Image: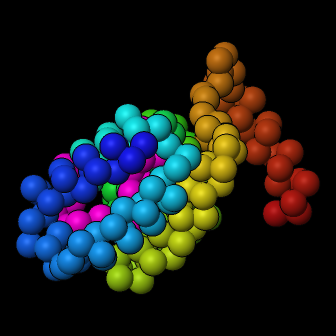
Amino acid sequence: MKRAINEVFALFKLNYHNQFSAAFPDTETLHHAKRLWLEALAAFSPQEIMAGAKRAILQSEYLPTVHKMLTLCAAGENGLPDARAAYREACNAPSPRANYNWSHPAVYHAGRETGWFFLASNSESIAYPVFAEHYRKLCARVLEGEKLPVPEQLQLEEKPGKPLSKEENAKKLAELRAELDI
């Protein structure tokens, strides 16, 4: 485990050189950071930690925080995209949203809890923070082991009824008019 943390920090030093040097200016700060990361990422295997670090390098031009690494390490096992990608997916999903092939059910549920109309009718500066908070809570539940249900797909009738004849339509219309007194 210590070896994986050391490898991650070496990888980050190569990839995020200036940011890394600014974040960890001396050996003492670097050792404190490594201990913190070791404790925070203890639930993950060395392979998951390395995969999370590689995801960080591919997805972000900025040095990740411990919080971001937790999400990136969990993404491999649970398939959780980062919050910004989840937000874009929720905003761009076509209707009916239940039938869309979601990258993870948490994205669908966060969009539903935020409100599809709210996402569509507000700017990103307003909608994203609301979505991100719902998504963060759902991700925490997933990381604790909860399995979120996949949205139920809407299906068309298997055997649609045959259309009514003109006479049957006229009869139904007369019945409705009589029932509604019009």
| Residue positioned 45% across, 56% down in the render | 38
The answer to if 74 sits in the magenta stretch is: yes
Along the viewing direction, whichever of 54 and 89 lies nearer the viewer: 54
Q: Position of residue 8 (x, y in %)?
A: 27, 50
Q: Position of residue 78 (x, y in %)?
A: 51, 40
Along the viewing direction, whichever of 12 and 174 lies nearer the viewer: 12
* Rendered image quadrant of residue 71: bottom left
Along the viewing direction, whichever of 87 and 172 lies nearer the viewer: 87
- Quarter of the image with the N terminus is top left
| Residue positioned 28% across, 69% down in the render | 30
Regarding residue 86, the answer to whether it shows in the image is: no
**Is 120 left or right of 113, judged from the image as shown?**
left
Segment colored magenta: 57-76
Residue, far bottom = 126
Q: Is residue 11 above or below residue 137?
A: above
- Quarter of the image with the C terminus is bottom right
Residue, far front = 28
| Residue positioned 66% across, 50% down in the render | 144
The answer to if 58 sits in the magenta stretch is: yes
Along the viewing direction, whichever of 34 and 180 lies nearer the viewer: 34
Regarding residue 53, the answer to whether it shows in the image is: yes
**Is 171 left or right of 102, judged from the image as shown?**
right
| Residue positioned 86% across, 45% down in the render | 175
Q: Position of residue 153 (x, y in %)?
A: 60, 34
